Amino acid sequence: MGEQQDEQQDVITVLVTDHREVEQMFSQLEQMAGDASEQAKTLAEKVVIELVRHSVAEEEYLYPAVREHMPGGPELADHEIAEHAEAEETMKRLEALEPADDEFWPTLRSLMQQIRHHVDEEENDLFPRLRLACSGEQLIELGGKVTRAKKMAPTRPHPSAPDTPPGNKLLAPGTGLVDRMRDALSGRGR
Ligand SMILES: [Fe+2]
């Protein structure tokens, strides 16, 4: 079944798929640049949700493996985690803005720059080295963990549920989307 297939994917495939999905949303947003519509806000929130989900999964499963198995792993993991924290600061500034605000599009552009740097670094350096340092079996086991971690996302409580309620409750304005996503995903605050 679908779930089992997902869990057979190695961690690099799972994370690269995330990167491509996020890049697709970035391209859409670039085409909307300067647009003050609600649609731009909705898409920006969607990308933030995906990015937090991706970051939490990497922090919980990828970076511990990097630390354990890769030469120079601890330093590399620290570097990536510091960059996640920077991107998260940008996401927190973004969540407080509306597309009509002067800072909305510049902040979104900063976020895109930070994430594209992250993607480039992982795909061109970290992932090839991880592939050398781990067995295929280890990578598939990690892929299963990451896939399951991402499913804990509160936006889709049930596979058949649409993207909207109760997911839209999560998107209520004026409440910290990034923090609530992170809490829900990591079990923090439960
Ligand atoms: Fe990544």
Image (cartoon, rainbow, N blue to C red):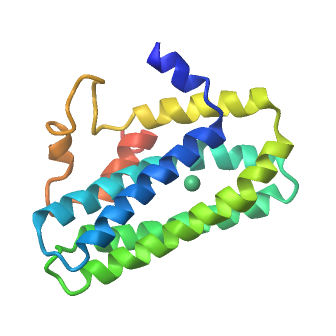
For the residue pair 161 and 181, the one nearer the viewer reads as 161
Q: Is residue 143 above or below residue 89?
A: above
Q: Residue furthest front?
A: 31
Residue 67 appears anywhere in the view: no
Q: Is residue 154 left or right of residue 53?
A: left
Q: Is residue 34 above or below residue 180?
A: below
Residue 161 appears anywhere in the view: yes
Q: Is residue 1 above or below residue 108?
A: above
Q: Is residue 98 left or right of residue 183?
A: left
For the residue pair 51 and 10, the one nearer the viewer reads as 10
Q: Position of residue 165 (x, y in %)?
A: 14, 37
Q: Position of residue 61 (x, y in %)?
A: 62, 41
Q: Residue furthest right?
A: 71
Which residue appears at 21% of the width and 74% of the height?
Answer: 97
Q: Quadrant of residue 145?
A: top right
Total residue callouts: 0
Q: Quadrant of residue 94?
A: bottom left
Q: Residue furthest bottom?
A: 102
Q: Quadrant of ligand 1?
A: bottom right
Viewport quadrant of the C terminus: top left
Which residue appears at 67% of the width and 27% of the height?
Answer: 141
Which residue appears at 85% of the width and 60% of the height?
Answer: 72
Q: Position of residue 129 (x, y in %)?
A: 81, 52
